[in-house]
Image (spheres, rainbow, N blue to C red):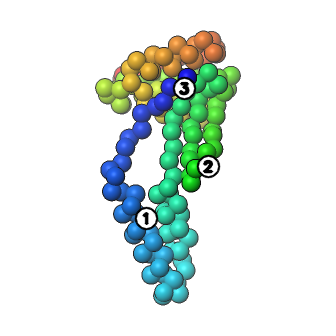
Amino acid sequence: MPIKGIQKARAKWVKPVAAILAAGIVVYEIILQQYLYVPIGLLVILACFFSKEHLVSDEGVDIQYTLFGKVSHNLWRWEEVTTIHVDRKRAMPDVALHIGKDVATRLFVFSAKDAQAVLDLAKKRNPAIQLGRVAGS
């Protein structure tokens, strides 16, 4: 069963207002026949329908992206993960985990209980993972 990371929730009004403003910009630019900001407006409208979710499972560390019901995954398998650094100050009262693969890192936030479950799962799936603490935490 996957462990879900904690995402900051936006206020419910942000996405509809952004979509309306972006649509207004697109219409205004088309009326003026100045098409410079039309692609930007269209990208903002698309972003209003975009969501992502952080998941940790037996397979590895996954960021799941969803746009109009189409789901895509960016999965790091446990064999690829090299480091996990625990940062207890950054996300208090939750725990931030900096999960690294080579020189790239991802920041995942979990409750304290889920963070411990992730660390246990990581050690079980790949004993070679370097566990550490972020300085000052």
Alpha carbon distance from label 1 to label 2 = 20 Å
Task: Pick the residue in front: 118 or 67.
Answer: 67
Q: Position of residue 30 (x, y in %)?
A: 51, 83
Mark on residue 2?
A: 3
Asked if labels 2 and 1 touch by Cβ distance under 8 angstroms, the answer is: no
Looking at the rendered structure, the kind of residue marked 3 is Pro
Q: Secondary structure at mark 2?
A: strand
Q: Which mark is residue 19?
A: 1
> Could you say which disc has been placed on residue 70 in the image?
2
Q: Residues within 10 Å of mark 2 (few under 14, many from 20)?
A: few
Q: Amino acid at mark 2?
A: Lys
- Whether residue 82 appears in this view of the structure is no
Is 66 situated left or right of 80 in this image? left
- Disc 3 is placed on an element classified as loop
Q: Residue at x 54, y 26 (%)?
A: 2
Q: Earlier in the sequence, mark 1 or mark 2?
A: 1
Amino acid identity at mark 1: Ala
- Residue 94 quadrant: top left
Alpha carbons under labels 3 and 2: distance apart:
19 Å
